[in-house]
Amino acid sequence: MGNFRCCKHGLLLCVGLLLNLPLAAQEYPGKAVTFTVPYPAGGGTDVVARSLAEQMARQLGRPVVVDNKPGAGGILGTHAVVKAAANGHTVLIGLTQSVLTNQFLYSKLPYDPRKDLAFVSQIAIGPLLLLVPANSPVQSPGDLRRMLKTSKGAASCGSWGAGSYPHLACAHMASSLKTTITHVAYKGEAPMLQDLVGGQLTFALGSLTSAKPYMDGGRLRALAVTGEQRMPALAGVPTFAEGGMPDPEYRVTGWIAMLVPLATPRPVVDRLQQAVQQAVGSPELKQRFEALGMVAVGNTAEQFRQRYAADWPVWERLVKVSGAKLD
């Protein structure tokens, strides 16, 4: 009898509850699924999206295609998904920037991710390495902290642009240590690392993928890794916390995640979540992500929501301290 109580609130509501959502779960996906990537083809997010699409097509029994919609720091592609039909056939593969930090970097956005998007799953996280030239006397995060306190403004750090995590972390480090660190913004990670190798920078934060050739060649040294855990590919490199720098600002990492328009039926969200978890759990994808310097996650929608809520104030502080604006 409990199934018929909804009819007291109207026939349409009853039909919707008894028919529409179960049908959504049973029939989804009814056609090809599109992964919208708000960044150019060929980048790390695109590579992850295409790897995931290949695996999830097997789970869903339908083609999964990748549609790159770059522009405005991920805003254009993210907004396109917000406006799309909430039926699970248009999915956002977004970064921390496009669905979190842009809220603080831009004074006005055409969407609010907490009100316009539903969380599905974090796909992978991308920890960054604290790097110094191989000939630097700095051997640990503690050494760097002590050196910065006495550098009298002579130290410098690099990033691949205002508002990037390396820029924000550098600003936080200067503020927390009550010192001055010169920030140098580059047009990409490659020129930043070249200057770091050449000794034009004191330190920088960079990705494993880009830094590894220099590390293997004995030209750069990794002192620490961001995040809560060590990277499987660099088990000997401690986290910032293990290195004596436990600030929450060093515990956050960038991530790649799946989201859909807010009104997407819950059974469809659950189906997508299940498919992501199965795909990300495969040895093939784990190895592919590790080669990209990422760590596979594949958590639940609720776990993603909790992580997002915990990260929000940390990123807000980071941006505020840095003074970065991208308008």
Image (cartoon, grey):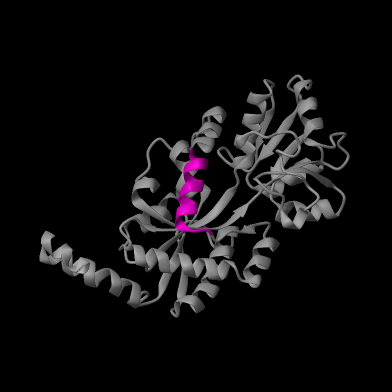
Q: Position of residue 207 (x, y in %)?
A: 69, 50
Q: Position of residue 217 (x, y in %)?
A: 86, 54
**Predominant SS of the magenta segment:** helix
Q: Is residue 69 above or below residue 308?
A: below
Between 110 and 12, the one nearer to me in the picture? 12
Residue located 69% across and 27% down the image: 181
Between 214 and 253, the one nearer to me in the picture? 253
Between 85 and 325, the one nearer to me in the picture? 85
In this picture, residue 61 sits left or right of residue 284: left
In this picture, residue 25 sits left or right of residue 180: left
Q: Can you tell which quarter of the image residue 168 is in?
A: top right
Residue 3 visible in the picture: yes
Q: Position of residue 85 (x, y in %)?
A: 30, 63
Count the marks: 0
Q: Is residue 306 magenta?
A: yes
Locate the N terminus and report the quarter of the image it occupies: bottom left
Locate the C terminus and report the quarter of the image it occupies: top left
Region of the chain picked out in magenta, as a range:
299-312
Q: Is residue 324 above or below residue 86?
A: above
Q: Position of residue 27 (x, y in %)?
A: 33, 77
Residue located 63% across and 52% down the image: 126
Residue located 17% across and 63% down the image: 6
Q: Is residue 87 magenta?
A: no
Residue located 78% across and 22% down the image: 151
Q: Can you tell which quarter of the image residue 8 is in?
A: bottom left
Q: Is residue 41 above or below residue 173?
A: below
Residue 111 visible in the picture: no
> Farthest residue toward the front?
1
